[in-house]
Amino acid sequence: MVGALVVIAALALTAAVLAGYVERAFVDSDQFANRAGAALQDERAREAIATRVTDDLVLAQQQDLVAARPLIESAVSGVIGGGAFGGLFRTSVRDVHRSLVQEDAQTLTLTLADVGLVVSEALEQVRPDLARQIEDSGAVTLLTENLGSVGERAVQVADAVRFIALAALVIAIAAAAGALMLSRDRRRTVIHLGAGAAIGGVLITAACAIVKGQVVSSVATPEDQDAVAAVWDAFLGDLRTTGWVLAGCGAIVAAAAASLLKPVDLTRHVERAAHAITAEPRTTAWRAIRGGALIIAGVLLLVARDAVLDLLVTALGAYLIYAGVTILLRLVAPPEPAAESDDVPRAQPRRRTAVAAVAGVLLVVLVTGFLAGGGATQAAPASATTACNGHEALCDRRLDEVALAATHNSMAVPLPGWFASEQDAPIGVQLEDGIRGLLIDTYYADKLPSGRLRTEIDDTNKLRQKALEDGVSPEAIDAALRLRDRAGFQGEGERGMYLCHSFCELGGTPVDEVLETIRDFLVANPGEIVIIVNQDAVEPADFVAEVEQAGLADLAYTGPVDREWPTLRELIVRGERAIFLAEERAGAAPWYHLAYEAAMQETPFAFRSPQALIGEQNLVAGCAENRGPSDAPLFLLNHWVSTDPTPLPSHAAQVNAYEPLLRRARVCERIRGHIPNLIAVNFYRRGDVFRVVDTLNGVP
């Protein structure tokens, strides 16, 4: 009975380890995506994917680019495994995996959106004309597979794996406890339990080598075999290590118990094994069995050499650990003299404690080393997170501990149709220059046959009051309302959503164009995080629909906003690099949050002269609380001079200069007890806002 329970415990423990690994590496969507991304770091997998991407970009999308195939393939090979491509790949794999294990998907399609954009970035300096064609080439489908009933059962399989992992562990513990309770010699039973665990680890390691060989050899071409081997290593390479650790832990447990009984004679065991292999059995039946066994062993060595070697090396390693630990433990606690009675000798409590302590330390060292090396957890490839918002030093800081350069009225730029601008360049250029916070305003407007925009106004007095609160001068408001009465602003128009500063008559940019620009920037720059604060005069559902249409929703942060934020590295690894906050209304999506309810606090923003903003006597008042609770985790420093209807770049040059801007940021940091997370300015190219942000962050 005891022996049967020991076998059950060993089998259940092995099953628990296998199921636990499968749950971690294959059922968890994030881990699955990370392992898929890790495969891209292997040159063998990169070459296979590069060929597929190139063919889809060249042959399937742009027939006229066939002549440029070598150049494109070179560019693709360069970006495969890089941060931008890796981010796209992991996001796509994660989405496909979630649909499979959560939604009973019957068809698996792995599509890389925006890959043309990533490749075009690589070609921009060499062939700008080619880069533009590649950018418009669309998505690339790497895999399409009809799963049928397999897809339908994916959710059940995932649930079953989780159940097996827990149930097998409970069975292993119960069987081991039962064996110890029924055993007359518990120390010897512990030896057998440890040996069973070690054997389970050896079998896991050997099975990995055997199955890998069969899988790889089943693929036709050497190139595909290399790719399959790379994918296997990414997903199951850690299982082999897990088997080694299990074997080592079992050997330590067995050795700890054996050291309390009698010394291990390693030479005698080796001699017995050698004699069993070389000695000729006496009976005919055993001779036949021995001959057949030797033939099988020889065939295995020829056809599965790596698997056999793994089995032998792992078994020998576990046995050497067993023997070595036993010897060390006997140095700590020498064996007792044999007892005269027939009863099993009992070790003194002090000796048992010493043996248990040393064995425990060895187990902790082994397991800790395994976990410190990643264990069964695969981090996202380092290439995607080597720099966060331009600096490696920022990666392990929370978002609420980092200062970012931001623009006020980011959309008010010198483009056709804008009567006055408050920034130097369009939003796409702002992002390229280093702006990471965008303060935008969204409105409904009708695009008229004349090409002009007419703001949708339900209540003129309400809009006037809102515009005054937003810093728009009465003169600018009156000018906008007068424009509405002119012929060019009359007639039926096409309703749309625009970025405007209170009145689209004074300038407006389609929301979808800006959102797509932000999406393109984030796709091409996988280590960057952007915060968008929307002064919204539109329905949340309509804004959310525009974000989804632009492909930005997949990059949006979905976590809580009223407490400590994740680190920049965590946001980047999770692919949640766009933070959307609304001033007035939010909702309609889990990633669209109210700014001033709990997420953000700010300073006043109505300053009519540089002196009112940066004058020594005004600094304290300029840091007073405005909107948002005082304990909100994000802090917005409003730092601009309002001189509507004509904003003055010369004012920005004064207040954005390094010394006055840094001085105000430091004063507000001291008064509010919080680093300014967003420093919002007008005409961001005037002065030293980027240098001030670097100083606050303590980076060069």
Image (spheres, helix red, strand yellow):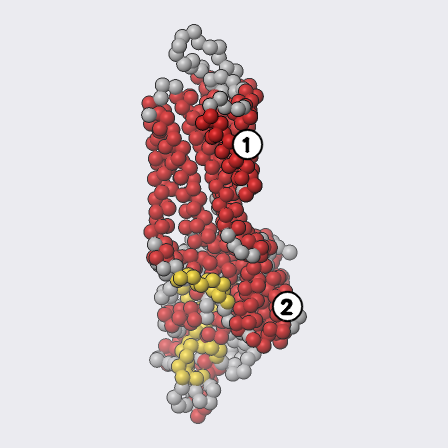
Helix, strand or loop at label 1? It is helix
- Say if residue 413 shows up in the picture: yes
Amino acid under disc 1: Gly
Q: Residue furthest right?
A: 126
Compared to residue 179, the image places residue 216 above or below, namely below
Q: CA distance from mark 1 to mark 2?
A: 49 Å
Q: Position of residue 24 (x, y in %)?
A: 43, 47
Helix, strand or loop at label 2? It is helix
Could you tell whether 283 is left or right of 700 in the image?
left
Q: What's the residue at 61%, 66% (across, down)? A: 73
Q: Position of residue 584 (x, y in %)?
A: 39, 68
- Say if residue 630 shows up in the picture: no
The 10 Å Cα crowd at callout 1, few under 14, some 14 to 19, many 20 or more, is: some
Could you tell whether 592 is left or right of 114 in the image?
left
Looking at the rendering, in which quadrant would you find the N terminus? Answer: top left
Name the disc covering residue 70, or none: 2
Amino acid under disc 2: Pro
Q: What's the residue at 43%, 50% (across, down)? A: 26
On the image, which quarter does residue 278 sit in? Answer: top right
Q: Name the residue nearer the viewer: 139 or 677.
A: 139
Q: Name the residue nearer the viewer: 230 or 295.
A: 295
Q: What's the residue at 56%, 71% (across, down)? A: 58
**Residue tagged by mark 1?**
317
Name the disc covering residue 452, or none: none
